[in-house]
Amino acid sequence: MLENFSFRTIVEYLPLFGQGFAATLWLSIVSFAGALAVGIILCAMNLQRSRLLQLPAKIYIDAIRATPLLAQLYFLYFGLPRLGVVLPELFVGILALALNSGAYIAEIIRAGILSISRGQVEAGIASGMTYAQRMRLVILPQAIRVTIPPLLGQAIVLVKDSALLSLISVAELTRAGQLLASDRFMPAEGFLTTAACYLVLYYGLKSLAAFSARWLGVRPIGSRT
Amino acid sequence: MKMTRLFVAGIALLGMTVAANAGTLDDITKRGELRVAVQTQGPPFSMVDSAGKRTGSSVELAELMAKEMGVKITFQDYDWDGLIPALLSGKADLLVADMTPTLARAMKVAFTKPFMYTGSAVFAKTDSKFGTMDACKAKGTKIAVLLGATGEKVAKETFPDAEIKSYKGGGPLLLDAVNNGQADCGVNDVSAVKGQQAAYPAGSFTIMPEVLSKEPLAFATRYDEPDLLVWMNLFLDQVALDGRLQKNLDYWVNSEDWKKDHQ
Amino acid sequence: MIWFQLQSLIGSYPLALRGLGMTIALSGISLVLGTILGFALGVLRTSGSRMLDSIIGLWVDLIRGTPFLVQIFLIFFILPELGVELGAFTAGIIALTNLAACFICEIVAAGIRSVPTGQVEAALASGLSQWQRMRQVVLPQAMRVSLPPLVGQYVLLIKDSSVVSAIGLTDLTRVGWLVVQRVPNGLLVFAIVGIGYFVVCYPLILLARRLERRMSAAHGEVQL
C-alpha cells in the first residue's frame, strides 16, 4: 500500500477532511466551554467548608480521574438510552468530554487558587476585606493569570480526546480518516492525513499557550500535555 | 461461472508452479496453523457466545477447513472494516465472514465462490412511525449502516434524501441504534439482522419485506495465494455435495436453532 | 429483566477476567519498557547536544500532538506495510510503550532541568566526570522531583490502554463493548467496567498524592 501512496485520493477526500476538521474544532470548543462550567462548579463545591458539598465533588473528581474516558463515553452512549434519554451521538460525545475534562479543570483551578501565597490573603484580611472582596480583588485575578497556561494544556488534551468520538460514529476528523481507509482500502493515506490535521490544531494551540504565557508573564505550572 | 473460475484458478496455479514458488498451503502445513480473520460480533456467522467461546456459521466452517488440512486454527477478530486490511497485511491467511464479493473489494482480495445468498433489507423498531419503506425514504431520516459494508452503499442509493450514519464495529450496533432511537431505520443483510435480533425481546424489530439487493456471500484470501483459493473452492464444493454446508446453514442461518445452545 | 441481565453478566465472568488480565498485561509491559526507554531519552535530551534535543523534541511533539487513537491505527495498519509483521497485541504494546516513553522522557527531562545549576557547577568544580555528576548529583535529585508525576503518568497509561480496544484487543473496555451488545444494559455493564479500572488506578492515584505531599514541591502540578 505504501509504494502506491495516492495523493490524488487524499485530494479527492479533502472536502471530507475539511468537514471533519471543522467538526472537531467546533465540538472541541463547545465541549471545552462545558468543561469550564463543570470545572468551576466542582471547584467551588470543593472549596466549601461544608462536607455536604465537598464530598460529592471529591468523589466525582476521583471517579473520573481513575476511569478511562472511553469507558465513560460508552457508559453514556449505551447507558443514557436506558434512562430514556436519547441524544444524537454528537451531544453524547460533547457531554462525555465536558464531564471528563471538567474534573481536571476543577483541579487546575483549585491548584491555581491555592497557589496564591498566604501573604496576599493575610494582606487582604489586614486591609479589612471580606471573604468575597478578597476573592474578587486579590485571589481570583492572580489565580486566573496562573491557570490559563494549564487550561490551554487541558484544551490540547481535549482536542485529542475528541478523536474517541469517532468510535461512536460522530462525523469528525478521525472518522474522516476511517472512511477513507475503509472505502478505498487505504489506511496509510487516511490516517496520515488525519494525523497531519491534528498536528495543525496542536501547533496552533501550543503557540496560543506560549503567547499567552509570555503576555501574562507567568511561568507555566507543569502541564499534562 | 464455476468452470471459468476453476479454469482461471488452474492457470494461476500453473503459473505459480512454473515460477517454482513454495505455495501458501505448504506454508500453512509447515506452520501447522491456519490463521483466520473473523468478525468480532456478527451473529450468526461469527460471535462470542455467553460461555465466551467463539462460534458461528463461518467459524464452524473455518474449523472444518483446518481439520481437513490437518492443522490447528487461530482466530483473529476484527471490526467489519478491519477484515480486509488484516488479510492484505498478511496477518491472516483468509477471512471468513458474511462478506459480499463486490467488484471494488475484488480489486484487492480474491473471493471464493459463494456459499450462500442473502439480500439487504431495511428494518425499523416495531410500532415506530418508520414501519414502511416510504417513511424511511423521507428527507432527514437517520439510516444506520455498517462502516465498510455493502448495506452502506445500498442505503445511499435507495435513500438519497436520508442521513446515512455509518457505525464502526458490527451489525448488532445497528440494532442497538435503532432500538434506542439514535437511528430511525437500519440497512443490513437480512441474515445478519435475523440472527442479531435474538438479543432483544421477540418482536422488537420489523423487517420490511422488500429486498433491496440480492447478494452472494463468500470467503476471501489474497491474490498471492492461488493454491489456497483453489483449495477453498474445492472445500466449498465438497461440503455442498455431502450436505455439511446445508446442515451448517440450516442450523445457524435458516432457523433459530442455534439460539437454544448459544444464548 | 434486570435480574435476567445480571445472571447473563455473571455468566460472562471468565471473559471479564480475561479482559482485566489483558489490560494489566498491556499496561504493565508498556510501563516497564516505556520507563526504561523514556528514562534513557530524557537523559539524552538534557545531555547538552542541541541536535539530540531537537530530534527528540520533534518526536515528543508528534506524539503529544496527535490522538493516541490515531497513533494506534497508524501502527496497526501501516507498520505491516513496512515489513513489520505484527498482531494486535504487539501493535498495542508498541503504541503504548511509545506513548509512555514520550511522556516519561519529558518528566525525566524536567526533573533533570530542575536541579539547580549551582549543584552542577559545584560538581564540575569538584572534578566529577559527566557520568559521575549525573549519577551522584543530578539524577538522585531529579528522581525525587520526577517521582510523583511519574506515578501519575502510570495512571494515565493504564487509562490510555483502553483505546487499544479500537483495534480489537480484548481488554476490559472491549469486553464491556462486547457484552453490552448481548446484554443491552449500558449503565450496568460500564459501571462494572469503571469499577474494574478504579480498583487498579485509585491506589496509584493515592500513592502519587502521598508522594507529592512528601515532596511538597511548588514545582510540577500532578494532573492525574
Image (cartoon, coloured by chain):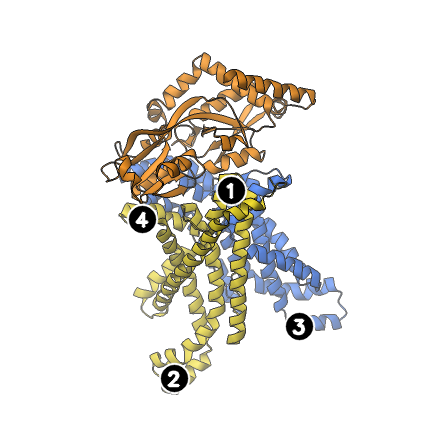
Chain colours: A yellow, B orange, C blue
The N terminus of chain A, quarter of image: top right
Q: Give the foreground label among 2 and 1.
A: 1
Taking depth in this image into account, of B119 and B206 the one nearest to the observer is B119
Q: Give the foreground label among 3 and 4.
A: 4
Q: Amino acid at mark 4?
A: Leu
Q: Are marks 1 and 3 on the same chain?
A: no
**How far across and down, in percent of the image, does residue C180 sit?**
36, 40
**How far across and down, in percent of the image, does residue A60 sit?**
37, 58
Is disc 3 placed on a helix, strand or loop? helix
- Residue A155 visible within the image: yes
Identity of the residue drawn at 27% across and 48% down? A83
Q: Are marks 2 and 1 on the same chain?
A: yes
Q: Which comes sooner in the sequence, label 1 or label 4? A: 4
Q: Are marks 4 and 2 on the same chain?
A: yes
- Residue C10 visible within the image: no
Cα gap from disc 3 to disc 4, whole angstroms: 55 Å
Residue with the mark numbered 4: A80
Residue with the mark numbered 3: C117
Q: Which comes sooner in the sequence, label 4 or label 2? A: 4
Q: Are marks 1 and 4 in contact (CB under 8 Å)?
A: no
Badge 1, how many Cα within 10 Å: few under 14, some, many 20+?
Answer: many
Cα gap from disc 1 to disc 4, whole angstroms: 31 Å
Taking depth in this image into account, of B53 and B174 the one nearest to the observer is B174
Is disc 4 placed on a helix, strand or loop? helix
Disc assigned to residue A125: 2
- What chain does mark 1 sit on? A
Identity of the residue drawn at 47% across and 43% down? A179
Q: Amino acid at mark 3?
A: Thr
Cα gap from disc 3 to disc 2, whole angstroms: 38 Å
- What chain does mark 3 sit on? C
Residue with the mark numbered 1: A181
